[in-house]
Amino acid sequence: MSLATPDTGAQGRQIPDRLKSPLQRFLVSWELLLLVVAVAVFTLNSFASPYFLDPWNLSDATFNFTEKAMIAFAMGLLIISGEIDLSVASIIALASTAMGFAVQMGADTPVLVMIGLGTGLLCGAFNGFLVTGFGLPSIVVTIGTMSLFRGISYIVLGDKAYTGYPSSFAFFGQGYVWWVISFEFVLFALLAIVFAVILHKTNFGRAVYVVGNNPVGALFSGIRVPRVKFALFLLTGLMSGVAAICLTSRLGATRPSIAFGWELEVVTMVVLGGVNILGGSGSIPGVVIAAFVMGMVTFGFGLLNVPGIVMSIFIGLLLIAVIALPRIAGRVIAHRKA
Amino acid sequence: MIRSLMKSRETILAGAILLLVIGIAIRFPGFVTPSNLANVFNDTAPLIILALGQMVVILTRCIDLSVAANLALTGMVVAMLNMAMPGLPVPVILVLALVLGALMGLVNGLLVWKLDIPPIVVTLGTMTIYRGIIFVISGGEWINAHEMSDAFKAFPREVVLGLPVLSWIAIAVVLGFIILVGRTPLGRAFFAVGGNPHAAVYTGINVGLTQCAAYVLSGALAGLTGYLWVARYAVAYVDIAGGFELEVVAACVIGGISIAGGIGSVGGALLGALFLGIVKNALPVINISPFWQLAISGSAIIIAVTFNATSSRAKGRVILKKAEHAA
């Protein structure tokens, strides 16, 4: 197993001499295609149900994706760097349990927020340490911590639930900044901007792409690969903590099964947003639009009384289709040219 | 010979299991009576069968997270068939379960082989799709014991030579895998594909086809287990065996099957499954709440994978990325 082993499946990435203009690039981009889908879904929904266009309904619809999208931003960076974190939903469960436990001890809102964020960071650090410290495959590590973190919640809570969160804590998940604009939506928008700047405008963001495209090359060009990956696990843990605060605040209760199966939806959102599951490419605007598409589809189905588990079939199909379709299309185009 | 045996992962794991059993036996001698151990084995049989299927998938550098959903869907289909046609003989049901499971495995395999989609994405997707289909076909209803025919329910519990049929099937699958993995070209191909896909291509092995075969095998076993599971517990509903795929992967990881592919043994998968099965059955005996189960299997995965990485020092590989890993 030498370092120079060529990739079996995909052809080597072609790097053109000159980039096309930004407008040209946008016109053939995944993001534009997604945007068209988003508009189509929105239009279909407004025809399908007369209640869809109500501003309060639309505001409610955003709760379908804001929390997941917050994690998806960090997960996007992590997947671009060639790793994955399947424990995010379990981190939510553990962070929520920790906050619930603190409530029983009489903690107030600021302390709860610190505990939520702190638990997220700790879990992220644990994942990052195992992956970068021992060089373990992230998929196995996070399948393990996925059971471990949620398992701890089950040990603490069993079949019980924590309730009795202070009323000031409710603001994060139920508060409105202005008219129908919820706090969660504002937070989502701010985080989108922050992550877009980090990924697309900073040295760290470039390093994330380089690590994902060629870890060996990254090492030789002076990037501390393990440190970048560790930071990304930390970030993913932190965002899971943020999501845990929002979700716990919105539900007002903690059960060990909280956010069950979210890891799948977050990964789907990231992949639908055009991030290459093998690492190396992707963008935050893509993930943002994907979040809207998934949120609107879920909400539209909800208005049409489609049960949740049927929606999950759709999400599973979406996940496979968004990866399969470009490959099939590419193959057809290559076949025509030949 | 003895030295290499001492060092082998299987010996260490077998030793750990022995210590575990002795530790429990000192406090609770009732746990180690032959009849109770037979019960533990019977209880672990589905895990053993699925872990072996998962093993060949992991050997070829893939992963199958859809096994539990496949099991549940097949179980529901055969239960509904039995409800509609109570006269259908058990052998027919067994064949149907195998075929249906294999078909679902084939879907995974074709997506991985023909479209080159990363295995984790394919099986995460099909996992939710298969689960969702159960809801669609059953309408969320349960199928209970009184709706199943007696012959349908009796088959896995039938005692032959002191052991239930379920246990015998697990033993048969283990023996079948020892032959398949060690004595057939396909078995060698699994190792070759996982060990070095480029070299495998040069030796004339079709990598994608081999991976697809592994998925079909894993799917067929999941289908078979689906019938056995539903018949043994005499109930079928949407969520049966929920999260079981993780236990199956855990059994493989604990058994020393490298997630990077190419390394593993039938004995390892068997011992990994037995370890989890014994822990699961021992918890109520030593008075620990079953809610500990999840955290224990999570810790076991992490400890096992860390131990494997540090003991073998083989280069780790990210399953998501086909390129080599830097450090």
Image: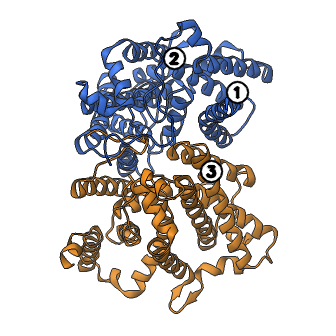
Chain colours: A blue, B orange
Residue A213 numbered tag: none
Left or right for B60, reference B155? left
Between B259 and A17, the one nearer to me in the picture: A17
**Mark 2 or 1: the one toward you:** 2
Residue under label 2:
A285
**Mark 3 or 1: the one toward you:** 3
Residue A300 numbered tag: 1
Rendered location of residue A24, percent (x, y): 59, 9
Against B241, is B87 above or below? Answer: below
Left or right for A316, reference A201? right
Which chain's residue wears label 3?
A: B
Residue B23 can be seen, yes or no: yes
Q: Are marks 3 and 1 in contact (CB under 8 Å)?
A: no
Rendered location of residue A28, percent (x, y): 61, 16
Q: Secondary structure at mark 1?
A: helix
Residue under label 3:
B110
Answer few, some or many: residues within 10 Å of disc 1's Cα (few below 14, many 20 plus, some between 14 and 19): many
Cα distance in 3D space between marks 2 and 3: 32 Å
The outermost residue toward the bottom is: B161
The residue type indicated by label 2 comes to Pro
